[in-house]
Image (tube, helix red, strand yellow):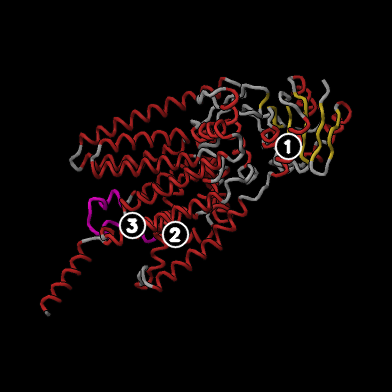
Amino acid sequence: MPDTDQRSRATDRRLSDDESLETLPWSALANKLTLAAILLTAALFRLAYVTQPLTDAFSWREVSTAMMADNFQHNGWNIFYPEVSWTGPGPSYQGREFQLLSYLSALLNAMFGWHDWTGRAVAAAFGIVTTLALHRLTARIWDETHAHAAALGYAILPAAVMIDTSYLPDPAMLALVTLGLWLFVIFAQTLNCEILLYAAASLTLGVLAKLPGLSIALVVAPILANLSQSGHRSEALRAARWLGAGFLLVVAYYAWAVYLGRTTPPFHVAGHGYIWEVGPGTFLHDWFYLPRLWQKSVGWFYGAPFLILIGVGLWSIPNAQTFQPSSRNAPIFVHLPLIWLGSGVLLFAIAAREISANPWNLHYLNVPLAIFAGRGAIVAVRAGGTMISSAFGLARLATLVASVLILATLPLLTAMKFPYAAAGQTLGEALAAQSVPGDLVIAVAPTVGDPIAIYYAHRRGWVFPPGGGTSDWSELLPDGAEAIAAVTDLRDNGADWFAVSKQARDSLGQHFMAHHMQLLKWLDETATKTADTKAYVIYRLGK
């Protein structure tokens, strides 16, 4: 009997030493249930904001994306001609990323009727795909425990929830490049060429959806090099050919986008403020805009609790010896989150001004940041030798998650989702009530340059000052002759209405109603005032 007990204990020890608990039936089920709970959490946080009108902190960029969806549906389904509605009667084609998200939204609107939040729903779906792909990628390169922590971190990360519920192309980009990298890692570990095709297609489509996704090439390249050096040169060459073909498609599309934006009115190509445009001297003088980025990171996107967890995770980066020996845990795979983070840092160094001004461009970094936040959470829970599965470990984990939710996720999302542009929506709906289809409108929203009033008027027209080309439509024109001449020119080009929110203020802090007193006096004399409320004033322009 003692011999039997000794053999049993020895077997148990060998099982714990040689076989991951993930392979045990009960643990496999627990892992699946945990993943399902994490995906449900991600869905609940994203669905909570899906039906909000496009009035949050990213209003103007969301509205432009939504306009493109509307114009696909009503003015032609050619995805290579993205068009906005805020630069006149049109066509108003612009050089933009491949309009995957807006095109899917247009298809849904055509099938189920128009909703201003359709794009948010599509973005949320992509956000759930990102959560799943992140989980499975982390499980492949680290382990299931870190996968759970990383995916949960992403599910409740304020920046990720905010962007995944915004009518923007970024959620599609991140979902597809994360999915593509996961599939590519599977290919590199299994040499399954069918998986390679799916990986290349997903990566290519992700980069087309938003150009910052091209940084993922810096993550894929070391995997290719490792594959070649480990004796699989033919597979590495095959992968390079497929990825190269995808890269040529990306180059061809963005060459077309630049051509379209530079040769058709309003002569606008999205994106600006790169280091080759502004100059490295300006970047250095402004400290690569890091003070602005830090302010937004703490007060908007991540919050102190998440930044602390990310810092702890980076301080305790695991290595191949952290995990049980496996081909999955070769050094190149273990270091992928750090390589991804490095590629994002390089992206920021190139486009610091653009990213700090338009923080949704940080979305590419949210996957590695979530992985390191998850790592930091595990280190914190395990401090002092505590087992996560113990009662004390679970209590620690629950306290940590509750603290992050209360101190970061909920307050930051409340701030970012506040309806800052609600007055612009109200102005647009008032214009819709007074005008008729085919009328052209000039609209000044609370944030000068935001086309939200035009969008909710369901009309075409102009922001004021008129946008397009190199002009800055976020800054008011000098009052008097120049402003009057601008309105006269728009009227001569077909503008029927001039509407302005009484809250309107430009990027310099100038209030429209105080700054443009001469223009308003001229409008009183030459146009018909059809509405004058506490919120807005609307004029019917005379011809």
Nearest to the eye among marks 2 and 1: give it.
1
* Residue 326 drawn at (x, y percent): 23, 54
How far apart marks 2 and 1 lie (CA) works out to 46 Å
* Residue 202 drawn at (x, y percent): 38, 36
Give neighbour class at mark 3: few <14, some 14-19, many 20+ (Cα, 10 Å): many
Going by the image, does 348 lie left or right of 387? Answer: right
Label 3: element kind? helix
How far apart marks 1 and 3 lie (CA) works out to 50 Å
Question: Which residue is depicted at the point 41% across and 58% down?
Answer: 374
Question: Which residue is depicted at the point 26% across and 42% down?
Answer: 188
Nearest to the eye among marks 1 and 3: give it.
1
Which label belongs to residue 144? 3
Q: Say which of 304 and 85 sits in front.
A: 85
Give the quarter of the figure containing the N terminus. bottom left
Q: Which residue is mark 1?
A: 429
Give the quarter of the figure containing the C terminus. top right
Going by the image, does 226 lie left or right of 436? Answer: left
* Residue 105 drawn at (x, y percent): 54, 35
Q: Which span of residues is magenta-colored?
A: 315-334
Residue 33 is at least partly visible in this image: yes
How far apart marks 2 and 3 lie (CA) works out to 21 Å
Question: Which residue is depicted at the point 82% across and 44% down?
Answer: 534
Residue type at mark 3 is Glu
Label 2: element kind? helix
Q: Which residue is mark 2?
A: 311
Nearest to the eye among marks 2 and 3: give it.
3
Among all residues in the image, which is located at the extreme bottom? 2
Q: Is residue 437 above or below residue 183?
A: above
